[in-house]
Amino acid sequence: MICSVAKHSILLLNVALLSVQLSAQTPAPSSTMASAAAKVLMPYVQKEASWAMEQLPVTVTASTSSRSSGGKHDFFSEGDYWWPDDKNPSGPYIRRDGLTNPANFTFHRDALIHFSQLSGALASAYVLTNDNKYAQKLAQHLKAWFVNEDTKMNPNLLYAQAIKGVATGRGIGIIDTVHLVEVTKAIHAIENSGVLSVSDLATVKLWFSNYLNWITTHEYGIAERDNGNNHSVCWTMQVAAFADLIGDEKTMDFCRNFYKYTLLPNQMEKDGSFPLELKRTKPYGYSLFNLDAMTSICQILSTKKDNLFVFTTSDGKNIELGIKFMFPYIENKSLWKYQHDVMYWDEWPVRQSSLLFGGLAFKNKKYIELWKSLNANFTTPEIVRNMPVRNPVLWVIK
């Protein structure tokens, strides 16, 4: 179900380079940039969009698991690092940190990633071509996930990252919907195209409003917010994106303050590292993932009056420090002086969005050039799952 993002990522490089060249005097890419980018990116975008045009809507209702305590419309996934106990095969699962259980039910997560990928491809094509056929196709998928009674997903994650014999769902499962962040970007891109009726667009936004309310008030959401590591960062990234979609400025302000006064000071060390991620059995991959998520928060929430990219704590911590810490290890992984990841060590790094967003924010061509050189042909499910930002066209072109 998961498609390759290889050639699509090539076009994103061109967006980044154009951004550096054309936005020297402005913090955000302009409509002029979009016009210039269209000429360069058209062949690549159209190729990826042609794949997306052939995809039929597949939602959580297409498959269910006997291990789920929820219903047909409920998202279900299982804790990645939980396995049968060899000493008690029929008993509760036990944890093996960093080791993914291949027997887990992953259909809903894969379907969500698939939805995110095609949404990004179609919306990017619409942005660059203004051809309504891409928006119309995307509208079919949006209605399947959020509007149609027979196929829509319930706006909660009560049954995400369940553990057999331990829990029917957990707060940390909320990280599974990080792939809805680019779906919100896609909705932004097509909402004025007219392909969604006023009623359908309102229903889509109501879904996100309801989900936003759930993840900010339910005990699972509160637990995820306060988790303390990359889960808290991804919670904030999602809340910021969903609030942005529905125009919830109060919640966006909360996220800005949460980033400045909780996430950044509590998770980053003075050298720019993330100690909580370095303690994991996959410290390299988790450090990359957390940095990407933090820079995405900055990209979503920064304004001219409140630029999170340059915000610095009283003891000198800022997002650029985090990028500078990881940069040499991305450029030359052999320099990594910490434990190697127990799985997927060879697959990282790929085209990390932190380099793109950081390169644009700080007008640093070294970051952009490194991003350009990295592997774009990543299809390993673990890597795809931890790369929720795949379509920078939707992030940097207004």
Image: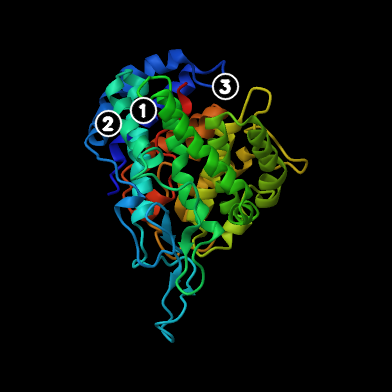
Q: Which element is circle 2 on?
A: helix
Q: Which amino acid does label 3 sit on?
A: Pro
Whether tag 2 and tag 1 are in contact, CB under 8 A, the answer is yes
Tag 1: amino acid = Ser
Label 3 sits on residue: 27
First-in-chain label (1 vs 3): 3
Tell me what residue is drawn at x 53 percent, y 52 percent. Answer: 287
Q: In this figure, which residue is indicated by the disc labeled 2? A: 49
| The quadrant where residue 351 appears | top left
Q: Which of 249 and 380 is in front in this view?
A: 249
Q: Which of marks 2 and 1 is nearer the N terminus?
A: 2
User: Which one is nearer the viewer's eye here, 28 or 148?
Assistant: 148
Badge 2 amino acid = Ala
Query: In the picture shown, does residue 128 fall above or below 104?
Result: above
Tell whether label 2 touches label 3 (CB within 8 Å).
Answer: no
Q: Residue at coordinates 44% horizontally, 81% vertically from top-left? A: 91
Q: What element carries label 3?
A: loop
Q: Which residue is drawn at 58% across and 28% down?
A: 247
Closer-to-camera residue (41/395) = 395
Q: How far apart are marks 2 and 1 (CA)?
A: 8 Å
The residue to which callout 1 is attached is: 124
| Mark earlier in primary sequence (3, 2) | 3
At which x and y percent is residue 6?
30, 40
